[in-house]
Image (spheres, rainbow, N blue to C red):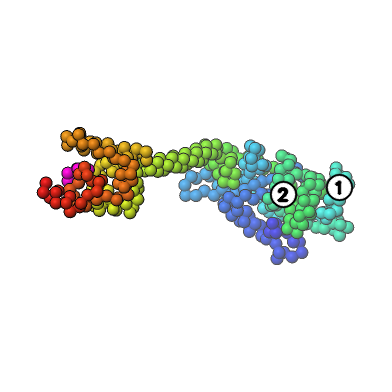
């Protein structure tokens, strides 16, 4: 804001008109959300996002070329509208205006809010000084809300009664000196030196200009986008879909875990050590070979604990039936089954795998291994 403060005593401290205009144009081209005030009829209105239209290589718009535009009023609630600005707002008037100091103006309005003209004053008048400002002045973001309390802009009474106390309370008198100096000139009557001859008016309708400012507003206020509801619905749907996918994944993992648990392997049933002993006793390389030769091991592994012995009994009965040996009865007792699953039995040759499971009816009884092998070889 310091660039807009004009020093009557040291011109070296002042910023040239062209430089100020270029800075405003640059800010507009970058879509920076900057607000300014322009006075007409002694009412200071708010103008946001001042831009200079400059055609590019495509989309020529000769009716807009090199003209200045801004949004007047509040940007939301459908009260902001595009207006065209005169380039003269950047100029610096030749005349110097003698006005009272801010403190004196504020005190006078506090005592008599409806006080009329305060001036004109002569040079060297008490509590007065000469000032010169442009017809355009920036408004800080923290004051813009106060500025928009009145849809038709602020009067000097409203500024010094509402806005100026906030500036003082925040200790911003020096930082906002250009704005205070600008508004002091409204006290000298109508028209004040900072009044523009004509209030900025809307330009002829232009789809390109409307799209330009719509993009600016949407960039700073995403919730105002026309498709914001659809985007929010899509975000909600996406989040719900993600939750559903995670729940489905968890369900599938639990299901696989349950299925894996239900498909107990022989190794999982007997344990690693006893399983290795079983492979050695049956002369099998792995569980696949074991189950191919003796499927009953898989049946026992998959059966509940209370039915494992029954599965073994059924397998023995089937072997005896297949061999026409129904007259031979082999009963698997709990003691025999315990010995069986503990690998405390003798099955040292491939004969049992060759002839079938439990081909030797005396497998679980006391036996002479040498005699048994000799008999097997003879058979």
Camera sees residue 107 = yes
- Please, what secondary structure does the residue beneath circle 1 have? helix
Residue 60 at x, y percent in the picture:
50, 45
Q: Residue at x 76, y 55 (%)?
A: 170
Residue 104 at x, y percent in the picture:
85, 53
Q: Residue at x 69, y 42 (%)?
A: 199
The mark total stands at 2
Q: Residue at x 70, y 55 (%)?
A: 92
Residue 54 at x, y percent in the picture:
54, 49
Residues at circles 1 and 2 in contact by the CB criterion of under 8 Å: no
Which badge, 1 or 2, comes first in the chain's sequence? 1
Q: Which mark is residue 143?
A: 2
Residue 198 vs residue 229: left or right? right
- Please, what secondary structure does the residue beneath circle 2 have? helix
Q: Residue at x 57, y 46 (%)?
A: 219
Residue 14 vs residue 340: left or right? right
Q: As displayed, is residue 163 above or below residue 124? A: above
State the quadrant of the N terminus.
Answer: bottom right
Which residue range is magenta in the image? 354-359
Camera sees residue 267 = no
Which residue is more in the foreground, 365 or 279?
365
Residue 129 vs residue 360: left or right? right
Which residue is more in the foreground, 110 or 25?
110
Question: How far is disc 1 from disc 2 in space, using C-alphas?
Answer: 20 Å
Which residue does the numbered mark 1 point to in the structure image? 110
Residue 11 vs residue 127: left or right? left
């Amino acid at each position: 804001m310091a660039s807009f403060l004009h020093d009557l005593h040291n011109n070296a401290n002042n910023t040239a008109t062209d430089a100020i205009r270029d800075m405003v144009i640059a800010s507009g081209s970058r879509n920076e959300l900057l607000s300014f005030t322009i006075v007409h009829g002694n009412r200071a209105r708010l103008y946001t996002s001042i831009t200079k239209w400059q055609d590019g290589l495509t989309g020529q718009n000769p009716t807009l070329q090199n003209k200045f535009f801004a949004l007047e009023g509040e940007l939301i609630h459908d009260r902001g509208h595009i207006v065209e600005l005169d380039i003269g707002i950047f100029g610096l008037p030749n005349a110097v205006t003698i006005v009272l100091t801010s403190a004196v103006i504020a005190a006078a309005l506090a005592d008599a809010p409806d006080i009329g003209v305060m001036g004109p004053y002569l040079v060297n008048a008490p509590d007065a000084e000469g000032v010169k400002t442009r017809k355009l002045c920036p408004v800080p973001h923290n004051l813009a809300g106060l500025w928009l309390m009145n849809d038709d802009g602020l009067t000097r009474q409203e500024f010094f009664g509402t806005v100026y106390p906030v500036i003082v309370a925040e200790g911003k008198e020096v930082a906002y000196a250009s704005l205070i100096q600008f508004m002091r000139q409204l006290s000298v009557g109508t028209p004040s030196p900072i009044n523009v001859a004509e209030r900025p008016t809307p330009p002829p309708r232009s789809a390109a200009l409307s799209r330009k400012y719509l993009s600016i507003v949407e960039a700073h206020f995403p919730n105002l986008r026309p498709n914001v509801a659809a985007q929010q619905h899509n975000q909600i749907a996406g989040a719900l879909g993600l939750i559903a996918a995670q729940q489905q994944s968890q369900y599938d993992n639990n299901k696989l875990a349950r299925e894996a648990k239900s498909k107990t392997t022989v190794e999982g049933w007997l344990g690693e050590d006893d399983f290795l002993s079983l492979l050695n006793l049956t002369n099998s390389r792995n569980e696949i070979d074991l189950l191919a030769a003796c499927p009953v091991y898989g049946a026992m592994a998959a059966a509940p604990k209370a039915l494992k012995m029954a599965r073994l009994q059924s397998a023995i009965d089937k072997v005896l039936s297949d061999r026409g040996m129904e007259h031979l009865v082999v009963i698997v007792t709990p003691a025999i089954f315990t010995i069986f699953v503990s690998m405390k039995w003798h099955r040292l040759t491939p004969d049992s795998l060759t002839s079938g499971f439990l081909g030797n009816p005396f497998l679980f009884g006391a036996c002479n291994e040498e005699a048994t092998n000799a008999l097997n070889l003879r058979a």
